[in-house]
Image (cartoon, rainbow, N blue to C red):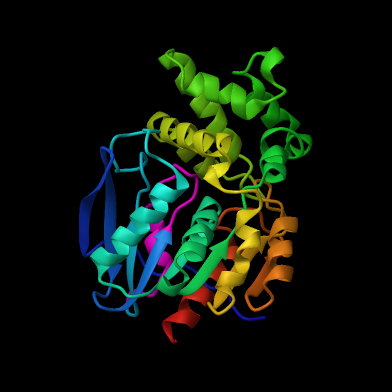
Amino acid sequence: MSQLRTPYPPIEPYETGMMDVGDGHSIYYERCGRRGGKPAVFLHGGPGGGCNAEHRRLFDPEHYDVLLFDQRGCGRSTPHAELEANTTWHLVDDIERLRKLAGAEQWLVFGGSWGSTLALAYAEKHPERVSELILRGIYTLTQPELDWYYQFGASELFPDKWARFQAPVPESERGDMIAAYRRILTGDDRDAQLEAAKAWTIWEGETITLLPDEGMTSAFSDGRFALAFARIENHYFSHGAWLEDNQLMRDLHKLRNIPAVLVHGRYDMPCPARYAYAMHEAWPEADFHLIEGAGHAYSEPGILDQLIRATDRFARQ
């Protein structure tokens, strides 16, 4: 068996900036690798997760010119945790603005979890701008997927963690956890908002890896991070990400000619594997890797191995 691939060494951006995208929003972006190399864009998860230094290490810096950015309202983008003018289609337009800033006619689009959702939405709207797709933790953001993770399904596997997730919500409102959280997260009680934001975010931090990962949990416990993560994620999920019913699967035919790699953990709790498998069946041209012994996080060894193999493969093309 070949050795598992691991991330490239840490790297600093060669350029950083803030882009005014209108509606009062400015988004942080950074560019890494070799200026003028193969263009790529990295789409982080959440929504509301932000990008970090580890994400830069998924690409060979000798070959790639990678743009990473914090989506509206999160990370270093401003205003923090803002929900106004913050929808999937605002973000799709932001990606196009960033492509023009990077001077790329086409670029590789890499997205994991919510980033896979956004990558699909962008690629289906602008297929001519996408040279390749790498999608991890496939999420088509349909109601059954939301129900599994936020109402009934994952709750059965993590009863202790689910109890902590339910705690901020009055029993009478637990029939619709997303709606109950929305009321608290958009309410005027700042203490209640922060408590709910942490509970929402820690639920995800504690269930995205196959084995417990204290580093992941502690990162998700940070109050500032949690507020943006929970508010923005809940905002998107409350609106079905402004997608038509089953839109991303319906429009897969637009991507048939784009080389693509799909990577999914067998034991992915937030994003059950059946949806990734359905995409594989509907899109047989894409390479599909269902990783045994892995959950949802990109940092799990088997997932990371396939992601880096994919970026290396496309770097040569």
Extreme residue in the bottom direction = 317
Which residue is nearer to you in this view: 32 or 74?
A: 74
1 is higher (above) or lower (below) than 227: below
The span picked out in magenta is 43-61
At 37% across and 55% down in the image, what residue appears?
A: 93
Q: Position of residue 97 (x, y in %)?
A: 29, 59
Q: Is residue 287 left or right of residue 122?
A: right
In the figure, residue 306 lies in which quadrant?
Answer: bottom right
Residue visible at 56% across and 48% down in the picture: 243
Which residue, as the protein is rendered here, is positioned at the far right? 156
Is residue 29 shown in magenta? Answer: no
Position of 249 with respect to 25 (left or right) is right
The residue located at (35%, 49%) in the rendering is: 70
For image coordinates 36% across by 39% down, the residue present is 73
Quarter holding residue 165: top right
* Above-or-below relation of 222 to 298: above
In the image, residue 104 lies at what x, y percent?
A: 30, 73
Q: Position of residue 253 (x, y in %)?
A: 62, 71
| Magenta span: chief secondary structure | loop
- Placement of the C terminus among the 4 image quadrants: bottom left
Q: Quadrant of the N terminus?
A: bottom right
Judging depth in this view, the residue of 14 and 272 nearest the camera is 272
User: Is residue 212 placed above or below 314 in the rendered structure?
Assistant: above
Say whether residue 11 is visible: no
Residue 53: in magenta span: yes
As displayed, is residue 207 above or below residue 246? above
Q: Nearer the viewer, residue 159 or 191?
A: 191
Left or right of 150, for residue 88: left
Give coordinates of residue 13: x percent, y percent.
25, 62
Query: Is residue 303 something one can see in this rendering?
Result: yes
